[in-house]
Amino acid sequence: AQTVTQSQPEMSVQEAETVTLSCTYDTSENNYYLFWYKQPPSRQMILVIRQEAYKQQNATENRFSVNFQKAAKSFSLKISDSQLGDTAMYFCALALNRDDKIIFGKGTRLHILP
Amino acid sequence: EAGVTQFPSHSVIEKGQTVTLRCDPISGHDNLYWYRRVMGKEIKFLLHFVKESKQDESGMPNNRFLAERTGGTYSTLKVQPAELEDSGVYFCASSRDRNTQYFGPGTRLTVL
């Protein structure tokens, strides 16, 4: 069975700082995708970044980047120059290549403070 | 392009009643998924439609839950009869390509 663990239930950082959200996962499969989703307060969940497991290069989307350590089964999200609009619940997630269901972690609630 | 929409946004019902949740996927998305987040727990997969067919319903908790997708367009998820443990947020997602799922805002279900 696949699992995703987010060890930080809640975090707060000052605006403009850099913050890293942790995520570890477990799967015996070799082909899978990893995701970070963001759910702002009272708004819908959106995909922030996606990483294919076969790619060694870490995915980057503007101020968001990941540190993908396949051997350690770690997939952390770094947010640079954090902004007030980054305040949200962040979910780390995993999907196997052979099916479409996404397995989510419990989420990290991130507060960006002015 | 309109996103995934869900109706209602919030539903409060008594234990034993029936509730039907609706999801309208993004136009042209053949894949439609239902997920649920119970308070304090992870978001869990319920089922996956490809057009009008159930591709995977391994996450459906029991036979009180019935999902349909008439004509491969919108989908409904009916809970009958509702129990207290069914309270949570029900998310719908759709995708054109595999592994890029777009989520709706969710329906918050409260069973009293």
Image (cartoon, grey):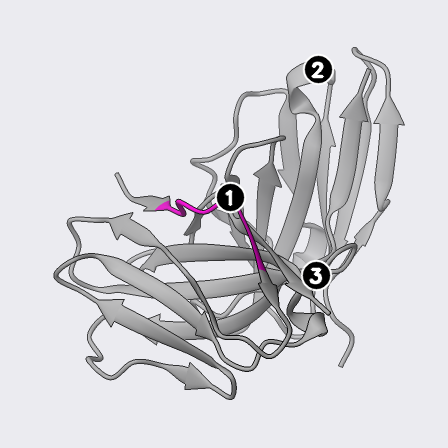
Q: Which mark is residue A40?
A: 3
Name the image quarter holding residue B10.
Answer: top right
Q: Nearer the viewer, mark 3 or mark 1?
A: 1
- Closer to us: B4 or B68: B4
Q: Which residue is mark 1?
A: A9
Q: Chain of mark 2?
A: B
Residue A44 appears in the figure: yes
Q: Position of residue A7 (x, y in %)?
A: 39, 44
Q: Does B90 appear above or below A67?
A: above
Instruction: Name the residue: 50% across, 80% down.
Output: A80
Q: Are marks 3 and 1 in contact (CB under 8 Å)?
A: no
Name the image quarter holding residue B65.
Answer: top right
The segment highlighted magenta reads A5-12
Instruction: Name the residue: 71% across, 72% down.
Output: A85
Instruction: Name the residue: 55% across, 58% down.
Output: A90
Q: Position of residue B64 (x, y in %)?
A: 64, 20
**Which secondary structure lies at badge 2?**
helix
Residue type at mark 3?
A: Pro
Q: Residues within 10 Å of mark 3 (few under 14, many from 20)?
A: some
- Distance, label 2 to label 3, CA atoms, is 27 Å
Q: Earlier in the sequence, mark 3 or mark 1?
A: 1
Q: Which residue is mark 2?
A: B84
**Which secondary structure lies at badge 1?**
loop
Residue type at mark 2?
A: Leu
Is residue A6 on the magenta stretch?
Answer: yes
Q: Which mark is residue B72?
A: none
